[in-house]
Each structure stands twice: as structure tokens, then as C-alpha cells.
Image (spheres, coloured by chain):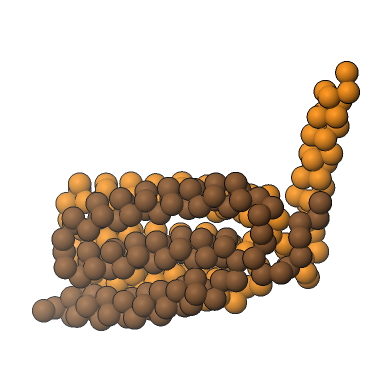
Amino acid sequence: MIDIIQNYIAGLLMIVGAAFALVASVGLLRLPDVYSRMHAASKAGTLGSGVMLLALAVVADDIAIITRALAGILFFLLTAPIAAHLLAKAAYAAGYQLWESSVLDQMGVTVSNNKQDKEKLETGNKSP
Amino acid sequence: MTSSETFLNATVLIALVLLSLSFLVTVWRVVIGPTLPDRILALDMLVAVALGFIAVIGIMTGYALYLDIAIALGLVGFLATVAFARFVMNREGAEVDDAEGNADD
């Protein structure tokens, strides 16, 4: 009986996860710039592979396999946002432009202020 | 072969088809770029799709060893993305590939 429920739940989870992965990759293809593509890849993509690992945990009978699958999900959920954040910061610092229809660039003010501050500090240190 | 096993086998096939489609679409983004961070992001997404493939094949064959491969692959993908991000940052101002104009300074 429990086998039957396990099989049905795992099958549904697999389809849901694969659909999330497909939606993420379509978003990766169609969104206009790096920063918005990052939304699709890092949120829907992570959720897709996490749900598919969860299906593996559901269908397994051994507690060691279940624990490893859950540890894998946890690890992936922890690392994916860090990787996306680092990549976005690096791309912004390297000067890759936002999409021209973007309405708000809150980083722009901070970054240019920091640059001005640095220049002030450097010139202030040099002058005396 | 009970009906629930038939259902599981059918869903494995459907999931493999969906994952193959998403793999192709992501590879297309790697090919067309247009900038370096786009390609890095698509490679990161390829790792996620490969994790999904590993999970589905693990369910299909019943080998739990695939799970260890999945965890190792996730670690390698994370480290690769971090290393690429540092590479992009260190290349600052070198070139912005596709003529979107220079940075604002």
C-alpha cells in the first residue's frame, strides 16, 4: 500500500520538478538582460532540481538515502542564491548594462558614491 | 507490474523529455550569449538540469549511488560559478562584449 502512494507522489513530484526546470530555461532564453535572467535561473531552476531530488527521497526506502537526498537539497538551496548574488555583483561591477527599459537602478547611486568617496580618500591621502 | 509502477515509469519518461527540452533551451542560451555573465548563468542552470537528470535516472534504476554524484556535482557547479564570478570581476573594464556602451564612469 505504502509503495503505491510512494510511487504516485514521486511521479507527480518528478513531473513538477521537470516542468519547473523547463520554465526556468525558457525564462533564461526570453528575458531581456543578465540580471532578469538570473531570476529565472536561480529561483525556478533551484526549485526544479530540489523537487526532483525530493522525489528521489520519497521513492527510497533506506533512511541513509533519504538523509542524503535531503542534505543535497539543503546544500543546493544554500549555495544557489550565493552563486547568483556573486555573479550579479561581479557583472554589475564589470559594467554590464541593465536593460534599457529598467526603471530603477538602486545600485548605481551606491556604486558611484563609493567611487567618489574612494577618489576623495586617495586624493586626500596624497595631498599632505 | 502494478499500475503504480506503470505510472512511475510513464512519469520518468515525461520528466526525461521535459528535462531534455530544458537542456536544449539552456544550451541555446550558452551559444547565443551575448555576454560572458549570460553564458556563466546558463552553465549554472545546466548544472541544475543535470542534477534533475541524475535524480530521475536514480529513480529509474534504483541505484542510490547517483545521489552522491548529484551532491558532488552541485558542489563543483557552485565552485565553478564563484570562480567565474571572480574572473568577471577581475576583468573589470577590460571589455564589455556586445557594444552596449561603456560603464558610466
Location of residue B12 with respect to A86 vertically, above or below: below
**Residue in view at x 56 percent, y 71 percent:** B33
Image quarter hosting the C terminus of chain A: top right
Q: Colour of chain B?
A: brown
- Seen from the viewer's position, the closer of residues A54 and B24 is B24
Residue A15 in view here: yes
Residue A10 in view, yes or no: no
* Percent coordinates x, y for residue B6 in the rendering: 19, 80
Residue A71 % position (x, y): 33, 46
The chain whose colour is orange is A
Who's the residue at 79% across and 40% down the image? A115
Q: Is residue A97 left or right of residue A83?
A: right
Q: Nearer the viewer, residue A48 or A16?
A: A48
Residue at 80%, 59% in the rendered image: A104
Name the image quarter holding residue A127. Answer: top right
Q: Quadrant of the N terminus of chain A?
A: bottom left
Decide if residue A105 is on the left or right side of residue B4: right
The residue lying toward the viewer, choosing from A19 and B49, is: B49
